[in-house]
Image: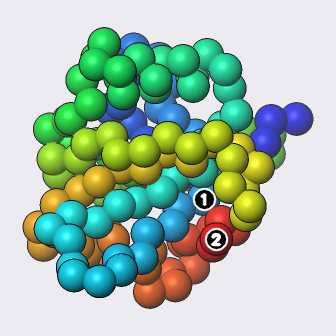
């Protein structure tokens, strides 16, 4: 049985499935406020996926995007089904890729977004303990 994921992130790769997101956390800002927010996505532990993401970080692909789509998923028996509405992250860029953290034993993909009203609406939903935030609360 496949691991249950809560969201999908579409748009990082031109071809293939969207990234399966198991949990989301907003990084806390220390000191002076930054002009961007960092969203951490707990993603599947897959060597092929890790390699494709590292290629983007190493300049062999685009690390900045016009937009990415964050879609919540529901489970219908054994299969994940995307819900109707997707949130759009405007002008996101790849920020970090960690192998493991103490609170999640798999890769964490960090994406930075500017603090536009559209992005802040999404960021604030997760920052303020939305029930959509999932199990990863680091």
Q: Are marks 2 and 1 in contact (CB under 8 Å)?
A: no
**Residue 135, quarter of picture:** bottom right
Check the image and report above or below for 36 versus 33: above
Q: Closer to the camera: disc 2 or disc 1?
A: 2
Q: Secondary structure at mark 1?
A: strand
Q: Which residue is painted at 20% across and 35% down in the image? A: 65
> In the depicted view, which residue is nearer to us: 20 or 81?
20
Measure the C-alpha gap from mark 2 to mark 1.
10 Å
| Crowd rating for badge 2 (residues with CA inside 10 Å; few <14, some 14–19, many 20+) | few
Could you tell me if residue 94 is visible in this image?
yes
Residue nearest the observer in this picture, 77 or 36 = 36
Using the image, tell me which numbered label, if any, was put on residue 13. Answer: none
Residue 102 shown left or right of residue 43 in the figure: right
Residue highlighted by disc 1: 23
x then y, percent, for residue 23? 60, 59
Q: Which residue is mark 2?
A: 138
Earlier sequence position, callout 2 versus callout 1: 1
The answer to whether 7 appears left or right of 36 in the picture is: right
């Amino acid at each position: 049985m496949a691991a249950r994921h809560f969201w999908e992130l579409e748009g990082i790769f031109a071809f293939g499935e969207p990234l399966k997101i198991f949990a989301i956390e907003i990084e806390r800002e220390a000191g002076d406020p930054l002009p961007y927010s960092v969203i951490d996505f707990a993603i599947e532990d897959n060597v092929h996926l890790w390699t494709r993401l590292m290629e983007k970080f190493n300049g062999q692909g685009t690390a900045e995007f016009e937009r990415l789509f964050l879609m919540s998923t529901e489970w219908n028996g054994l299969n994940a089904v995307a819900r109707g509405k997707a949130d759009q992250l405007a002008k996101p860029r790849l920020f970090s890729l960690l192998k493991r953290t103490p609170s999640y034993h798999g890769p964490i993909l960090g994406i930075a977004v500017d603090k536009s009203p559209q992005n802040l609406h999404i960021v604030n939903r997760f920052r303020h303990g939305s029930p959509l935030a999932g199990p990863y609360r680091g």
